[in-house]
Amino acid sequence: ELKQRWRTLQHVTISPTRIGAITQAALALNNAWK
């Protein structure tokens, strides 16, 4: 799952708004896994 997500992220063109969204998603996932 993680590898698939990173592959998807790598295909995405990084823009400031997307970086913010990705950061929020990463934080949400971290909280969910705790």
Image (cartoon, rainbow, N blue to C red):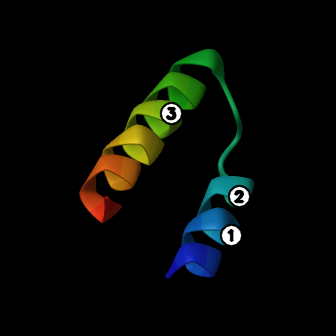
- Residue type at mark 2? His
Q: Residue 4 location in percent, x, y?
A: 58, 78
Q: Which residue lies under the disc numbered 3?
A: 23
Q: Viewer-proximal residue, 14 or 22?
A: 22
Q: Is residue 9 above or below residue 25?
A: below
Circle 3 residues within 10 Å: few <14, some 14–19, many ≥20: few
Give the residue at the far front of this rendering: 34
Query: Could you tell me how far apart the alpha carbons at marks 3 and 2 are, in whole angstroms?
Result: 16 Å
Circle 1 residues within 10 Å: few <14, some 14–19, many ≥20: few
- Residue type at mark 3? Thr
Q: Which residue is drawn at the image coordinates 41% and 40% (left, top)?
A: 27
Q: Image check: 13 left or right of 27? A: right
Q: Residue 19 location in percent, x, y?
A: 59, 28
Q: Image check: 9 left or right of 34? A: right
Discs 1, 2 touching: Cβ within 8 Å: yes
Query: Could you tell me how far apart the alpha carbons at marks 3 and 1 are, in whole angstroms?
Result: 16 Å
> Any mark on residue 22, and which?
none
What secondary structure is found at the residue carrying circle 3? helix
Q: Which residue lies under the disc numbered 2?
A: 11
Q: Viewer-proximal residue, 32 or 3?
A: 32
Quadrant of residue 33 within the rendered picture: bottom left
Q: In this view, does 19 lie above or below 11?
A: above
Query: Could you tell me how far apart the alpha carbons at marks 1 and 2 are, in whole angstroms?
Result: 6 Å
Q: In this view, does 9 lie above or below 18?
A: below
Q: Which residue is drawn at the image coordinates 65% and 65% (left, top)?
A: 6
Give the residue at the far top of this rendering: 16
Q: Viewer-proximal residue, 33 or 4?
A: 33
Q: Which residue lies under the disc numbered 1?
A: 7
Q: Image check: 17 left or right of 28? A: right
Q: Residue 9 location in percent, x, y?
A: 63, 55
